[in-house]
Amino acid sequence: MSNKIYHITLSEAERTTLTEVTRKGTHSVRRVNRAKTLLLSAAGESNEKIARQLGITTATVCHTKARFVTEGLEASLNERPRSGQPRKLSGHDEALLVATTCSQPDEGHSRWTVRLLADKLVELEVVEHISPTTVYNILQKQELKPWQKKVGALGELMALISPAWKIC
């Protein structure tokens, strides 16, 4: 980013919006800090003083002010999409994992393990490769623990519907 100095001038509507963001407890800390940054900047506070007061870096103050000037109020308050790694499994594939988890394990095994489930997903050609850690994280999100005797309410429900439920 260049070394431009951005002067913040707020309209009455923008000031009202920013004040509401700082007063209501329904916003993320980052969003509230950005709103406070813009309000303090409009009041003439220095970047260093704002950063110290809010516990953020001066770079964050500068970036927030620059986004406000170049992209507007909403862009300066909201998160930009992050690049991040794409999901390993689609919603349909996760449903298949849950159904498999609730089924009887392959012959020779008394219960599913995350490694067995990962191997099963590869065997079913759901994915080319998936780590047991990824499978574990998905199961945690669904509150399933197949390595324990009790697989949770969903497992009990699946057993009631069809005791022979198994994905082939």
Image (tube, rainbow, N blue to C red):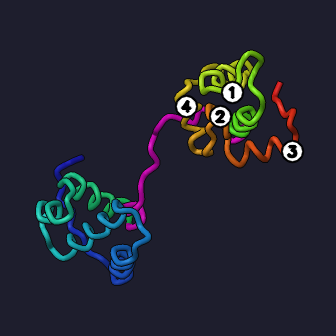
Q: In the visual, does 51 lie left or right of 11?
A: left
Work out whether mark 4 precedes mark 1 in sequence or the reverse, and give the earlier one. 1
User: How far apart are the alpha carbons under marks 3 and 4?
Assistant: 28 Å
User: How far apart are the alpha carbons under marks 4 and 1?
Assistant: 19 Å
Q: Mark 2 touching mark 4, by CB under 8 A?
A: no
Q: Mark 4 touching mark 1, by CB under 8 A?
A: no
Binning the other alpha carbons within 10 Å of mark 2 as few (below 14), some (14 to 19) or many (20 upward) gives: many
Residue, disc 3: 161
Residue 17 in the image, given as x and y percentages of width and height: 39, 77
User: Of the residues shown, which amino acid type is indicated by label 1?
Assistant: Arg
Residue 164 vs 30, above or below: the answer is above
Which mark lies nearer to you, 2 or 4? Answer: 2
User: Tag on residue 146?
Assistant: 2
Q: Mark 3 touching mark 4, by CB under 8 A?
A: no
Q: In the visual, does 72 lie left or right of 117?
A: left
Residue 78 vs 20, above or below: the answer is above
Work out whether mark 2 precedes mark 4 in sequence or the reverse, and give the earlier one. 4
Which mark lies nearer to you, 3 or 4? Answer: 3
Q: Residue at x 61, y 20 (%)?
A: 129
Which portion, as a residue range, is magenta?
73-92
Q: Residue at x 17, y 55 (%)?
A: 58
Residue 157 in the image, given as x and y percentages of width and height: 79, 47
Q: Residue at x 38, y 81 (%)?
A: 13
Residue, disc 1: 111
Residue, disc 4: 134
